[in-house]
Amino acid sequence: MGQSTNNSPASTNILEKWFHLSEQGTTIKRELLAGLTTFVSMAYILFVNPSVLGMAGMNKGAVFTATALSAIIGCLLMAFLANYPIAIAPGLGDNAFFTYSVVLAMGISWQTAMAGVFVASVIFTILSLMKVREAVINAIPHDLKLAIAAGIGLFIAFVGLQGGGLVVASKSSLVQLGSLTVPTTWLTIFGVLAIALLMAKRVPGSIFIGMILTTLLGLFTGLIKMPAHIISLAPSMKPTFGVALTNLGKVNTPQMWAVVLIFLLVAFFDTAGTLVGLAQQAGLMKNDRMPRIGQALMADSISMLSGSVMGTTPTAAYVESSAGIAVGGRTGLTALTVGVLFAFSLLFSPLLTVVTTQVTAPALIIVGSLMASSLAGIDWLHFEIAFPAFMVVAGMPLTYNISYGIAFGFILYPLTMTVAGRRKEINWIMWTLLFVFILMLYVLNVLP
Ligand SMILES: Nc1nc2[nH]cnc2c(=O)[nH]1
């Protein structure tokens, strides 16, 4: 009794018992530093998520609170169920699909779309519990999984370039460079440069720091208005809480089933792929397999489920966790630290008004470039693989729809592989998906 510091024998013993720190060759101090590093690398989502979902018509304050709470739930579950140094929060790929493809392009209300997220998360949770999850993960060709991540990267970068005014519509060529005489566009240019240079210098939390610098420049030049307060109680989730449940009845349409399928595919494969990549980076794979992958998927699926009820799009295992792993994070204590910091951040909602589109745009562009790095793993030398992968990557930004990119790849892949004499490598799940995606194109494009 009487000792209350983190390093007291009692608390050390508890943390040791929960997280097996010495077995993983790590220390409390290193895990806390890793958690702080990952948190500052991903804290931008607290402002970017309300900005993107706000465009779908959702209440920004409620989304802010739902974002923080779903991240807290995800990180705590990751810490205690799976003991991995991996943080969870609403993914940029998923919120972009929700707003730009489902709500704005297909004209589905955000309320119905959120009910779709809920249904997808229930299926995801069931899948995480069942042993077939490994079979499903292995059934999708590695190159297509990489192409999906890279395509989403290009898509969100495109969204950022437009949001920041750098790319605008053109009558003759569809897109062109925006005007460099617009002052707010220069805020975005400054933000991209600031973050890119900080990243090139390997500064932890580059995105967060770059966004703060851009906001300060905006405030200083009068392009952004001063906030009324800096801290306050977290905004109420009343405008969004439970909406997914009250709209469940509206999911029963062909369009919504197609949307549910894409939410499920993106959420499941994004998290599964990211988990394995991060576990490899941390040296936590055993015989080329990830121990406790079921628990880690479960942590994500439950936070996605609770997020959809509270009012946010699917959560993902964050690629930014690699920043904390790079500074030594190896256990769930890193994830727990991120969760605690998200709890503190609930107080900072008044800053939502200063984080404008020009401030969030650089984050989208830079995270897009990070996600595009999976292009490196694609087998470009074999046309039967390279072309379907290319069509996934090019299809997402150019059709402004993540589902179409995925559909192009899944329809082409079994065909090009078969003609190339590699039919044996295509399993029945891929043939089934070929027909599912042809049906999906019909439902999303021809039927309406
Ligand atoms: N894996 C992953 N990491 C992210 N970091 C920010 N957004 C995302 C996302 O959608 N997926």
Image (cartoon, grey):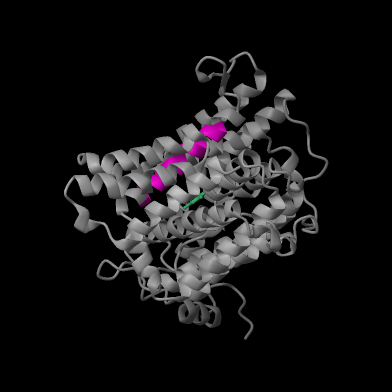
Outermost right residue: 228
Q: Is residue 162 left or right of residue 58?
A: left
Outermost front residue: 447
Residue 177: x %, y % from top left: 53, 18
Residue 155 is covered by the magenta coloring: yes
Q: Is residue 284 left or right of residue 114?
A: left
Outermost bottom residue: 1
Q: Nearer the viewer, residue 99 or 317?
A: 99
Residue 179 is covered by the magenta coloring: no
Residue 159: x %, y % from top left: 56, 34
Q: Nearer the viewer, residue 445 or 241?
A: 445
* Residue 174 visible: yes
* Residue 340 visible: no
Quadrant in which the C terminus is drawn: top right
- Quadrant in the picture for residue 416: top left
- Name the main secondary structure of what is drawn in magenta: helix
Q: Is residue 408 left or right of residue 334?
A: left
Image: 203 above or below 398: below
The range drawn in magenta is 145-160
The residue under the point 36% across, 69% down is 134
Residue 49: x %, y % from top left: 63, 47
Give the total number of marks visible in the rendering.
0
The residue under the point 41% across, 65% down is 330
Q: Nearer the viewer, residue 99 or 80?
A: 99
The residue under the point 33% across, 42% down is 389
Residue 114: x %, y % from top left: 66, 56
Quadrant in which the N terminus is drawn: bottom right
